[in-house]
Amino acid sequence: MSRASERAYNNIRSMILSGELQPGSQIREEALAELCGVSRTPVRDSLRRLEAEMFIRRNDSQRSFVADWSLDDLEDAFQLRAMLEAHAAKRAASRITREQLGWLRFHNAQLKQAIDMPNPDVPKFLDHNRQFHAIILAAAASERLASMLGQVTEQPVVLRTARQYDLENLRRSHHDHDELLIAFDKRDGEWAAAVMTGHIRRAFHAYAEAHSTDTEIRKSNLAA
Amino acid sequence: MSRASERAYNNIRSMILSGELQPGSQIREEALAELCGVSRTPVRDSLRRLEAEMFIRRNDSQRSFVADWSLDDLEDAFQLRAMLEAHAAKRAASRITREQLGWLRFHNAQLKQAIDMPNPDVPKFLDHNRQFHAIILAAAASERLASMLGQVTEQPVVLRTARQYDLENLRRSHHDHDELLIAFDKRDGEWAAAVMTGHIRRAFHAYAEAHSTDTEIRKSNLAA
DNA sequence: CGAATGCTATTTGTATACAATAAGCTGCAT
DNA sequence: ATGCAGCTTATTGTATACAAATAGCATTCG
């Protein structure tokens, strides 16, 4: 995607993710155009894309609003995600190459290292975690699956609380990855799928907790 | 969506589905604009949408081509579809209302009627079949699931052969629906999911057969 | 007082002109 | 012949002007 269009997309997306654009609030093309320093044309492109990704919804008269997801919607998304990632793991188990396995091991070692120290480096953990999952998705070798997972992995949920991932959870994630590695090594798709399902379900509950906390904070802010 | 934009979208989409725009061929915005009698702006909107739906793909320099799916890709899509529809059936089993069940029965009776006659009315069958599945999807009550299923239900596969659905298959579909109805009635999500999986797998094989035949024909046409 | 109607302001949709980029070609050099 | 440079043409990207639609408001009529 070319310069202006891509800039607009990234800007708007991150404004939604960061909560700068509040869930439920209306969006006007021209306002965004000014914010992004481009014309309405690339903004419109971005809005269409974000609408497909369900970051934005439109009412019957084509006005756009930042999507506002309830806890139920969040669970719904995670249910879908668990199903799709498990499917990916199953496919990957029979297709993954030695080299890909090597990379999985590398990223898992790195993310362990990121939290096995006095001052845990959470961003580093998240980055290697992301890459770990990306490799599995690549090994699954299904373009459609990848495109669908893209729609449920990045949640448009505002987390004002500075993402307090508790270490215990991160360590468990690391162990899940370890087990996935063994399942892959043994080419056991069923096992890989089962581990992955649990892995994502745990992520959901961690997320849900953060989401409730955040919602509380937002509510009390509104009351004040 | 407003007039010009919607017109463009429907036109282009049906040109792809009908094979008027051949798989693999390049698409030029201006040409389509003329064909649809609108300017490039709504055409570009449509192309973006069709790209998200994987009817169209773009190369690295942003040129658009009609997607060309292999038999493997087709199977991939059906695998995803089977998984998602089974999931929908499972969710629907615990949420479906008496009224929705009534409509399911109605459409299933209608589609049976459409093929239980000397001159089977296949389009009528397909229409009621579509509505049958739509009701289940609605009962599943997951917007994201619906949006994902939209991406895999309408296959951008050219079927030049005038869709020779054999009657035996259609009858079996009807029986699957019957069984789904019982499963729903008993609120047995597992059963519903299992029946649905088989139902979609059968559809895949019917489709795959038609696809191979079509590919043969296309090849011999090219040779001539 | 409430509902309906028409006006105005706001917002989105479409067309078009122009800019940027990529593809294809021509001719030259090796 | 082959490959590369530079030009030309084809195609997409962006901005902008204008058209259409919609919402919000005020005014009027029942």
Image (tube, coloured by chain):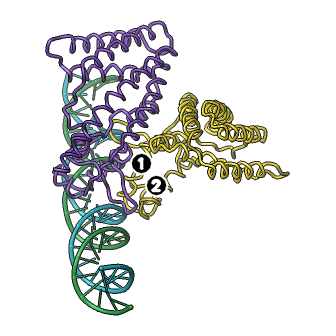
Chain colours: A yellow, B purple, C green, D cyan
Residue count near mark 2 (Cα–Cα under 10 Å), binned few <14, some 14–19, many ≥20: many
Q: Residue B48, percent across and down?
A: 35, 50
Neighbor class of circle 1 (other Cα within 10 Å; few <14, some 14-19, many 20+) is some
Q: Is residue A204 visible?
A: no
Residue that appears at 60% across and 48% down = A97
- Residue A168 lies, with reference to residue B135, above or below; the image says below
Circles 1 and 2, Cβ within 8 Å, touching? The answer is: yes
Which residue is at a point 78% across and 38% down the rendered structure image?
A: A168
Say what amino acid the circle numbered 2 marks.
Tyr
Image quadrant assignment for residue B119: top left
Q: Return the residue at label 2.
A: A9
Residue toward you, A103 or D7: A103
Q: Earlier in the sequence, mark 1 or mark 2?
A: 2
Q: Which mark is residue A177?
A: none
Is B152 left, or right, of B162 in this rendering?
right
**Res. A49 mark:** 1
Q: Residue at x 44, y 7 (%)?
A: B185
- Dot 1 falls on a residue whose secondary structure is helix
**What's the residue at 66%, 52% (across, down)?**
A103
- Residue B191: x and y in percent read 49, 14
Q: Could one spot residue B180 in this view of the protein? A: yes
Q: Quadrant of the N terminus of chain B?
A: top left
Please state the chain letter of the residue tagged with numbered disc 2 in the rendered image. A
Mark 2 element type:
helix
Q: Disc 1: which chain?
A: A
Q: Is residue B184 left or right of residue A81?
A: left
Of the pair A140 and B152, the residue shown nearer to us: A140
Amino acid residing under circle 1: Arg
Distance from disc 1 to disc 2, alpha carbons, whole Å, reads 8 Å
Drawn side of residue B68 relative to residue B165, left or right: right
Furthest residue toward right:
A118
